[in-house]
Amino acid sequence: MKTLALSAALLLLVQDGGLTPVQPPQGLREHPVRTPVPPNAVALSAGVAPPPGSIALEPNMPGHRRFRPPLFPNAGWDSPMAGTTKDYAAYLGVYWRAPYLAPASAMAAYPGLEVPGWAAPGPYRADIVRSQARPGEEALFERRMAFLAERVMASAPFRDPHGTSIEPELLVEGYGKEFGPRAQPVMRGAITFRLNVIQPNTGSNERIGSRIRSHQPAVWLKLWLNPSFANCELPHGQTARGVLCLQSRARLAWRGAKPGVKPLAAGLLGLDPAIYAGGATAADLRMIKVEYGGGTAMASELGRGRLHPHDPLGRAIGACLALDWPALLDQAAAIG
């Protein structure tokens, strides 16, 4: 009876982003390569150009001696196309919406990946710089920022981290003196989540209880609140509330009926300042830009579609892709 109840619960589970698992986990689930190797691909030594009419067999192509079958949907050579570009990170979003798709040991781990990492506990307070806002506006904006930090830290990619320790930093910029006192319609701020990689047997680690806090910088995920600049290169999957920017390694989400971006050129969207017009209060939240950067020694695996989702970079990209940012923006903006 317990097994049937668990299966029923998993069948009904609906994750952020609309992904509904169709069956409970059943051990290792390999997803076979469905895309064949190009017929004109030839194996070559490093630095050797392919003959006319042929292409070099790349490390992420099926059949290459360095290729490993992907363990997650749409990974590796089967990654979906976004325009003319392969979106190798797409499987990370799928994984972190339903992280039981494969166990953590399904892909070859590396030293430190299994080590429980420390996550900075709340409450999260913000530093305030260059602000010419009123104290009440600052306090309201800080509460909304703290809510976002708490929700991201509690999300699947960031809670119970292994192989990394995570620390958020909150910064309220207020109105910014470069535009004159109270010249901007909304306040601005940033939340930076620093994911430090755990490297065993080094002096960059400290033990806090049963977990490890690393001081070895690796990856960051940053939330720009009401950004003043938000170009979107290679926009993909645009909706009425957001868009994924493949080349910019970012996701944009906005509120209201007005679109937050406008076309600038082919394959390029830019911030539409009209998104900030008519704000209810200076602490109103209208837009979030979510951006990730940095990397680890395993970062090159992303371009082959086989980056371990539990790698710090896999967690940052997973948070960027898997979280429902328009919904989080709405919830934060509703805080009084």
Image: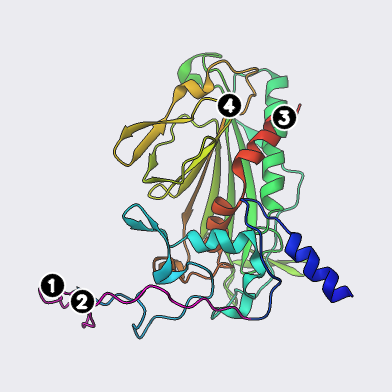
Q: CA distance from mark 4 to mark 3?
A: 13 Å
- Residue 214 in the figure: left or right of residue 52: right
Judged from the image, the secondary structure of the residue bearing numbered disc 2 is: loop
Q: Position of residue 328 (x, y in %)?
A: 66, 40
Instruction: Point out the residue furthest to the right here.
Output: 1
Task: Say the numbered circle drawn on residue 53.
Answer: 1
Q: Is the stretch drawn in magenta largely helix, strand or loop?
A: loop
Q: CA distance from mark 2 to mark 4?
A: 50 Å
**Of callouts 1 and 2, which one flags the residue occurring earlier in the amino acid sequence?**
2
- Residue 212 in the figure: left or right of residue 177: right
Q: Position of residue 151 (x, y in %)?
A: 70, 47
Relative to residue 336, is residue 15 depicted above or below?
below
Judged from the image, the secondary structure of the residue bearing numbered disc 3 is: loop
Q: Which residues are magenta?
A: 28-54
Q: What amino acid does circle 1 point to? A: Gly
Q: Which residue is mark 4?
A: 256
| On-image quarter of the C terminus | top right
Judged from the image, the secondary structure of the residue bearing numbered disc 4 is: loop
Q: Which residue is mark 2?
A: 40
Q: What amino acid does circle 3 point to? A: Ala
Q: CA distance from mark 1 to mark 2?
A: 7 Å
Q: What amino acid does circle 2 point to? A: Asn
Relative to residue 116, is residue 277 depicted above or below?
above
Q: CA distance from mark 2 to mark 3?
A: 56 Å
User: Residue 42 versus residue 247: which sits nearer the camera?
Assistant: 42
Asked whether the viewer can see residue 148, the reply is yes
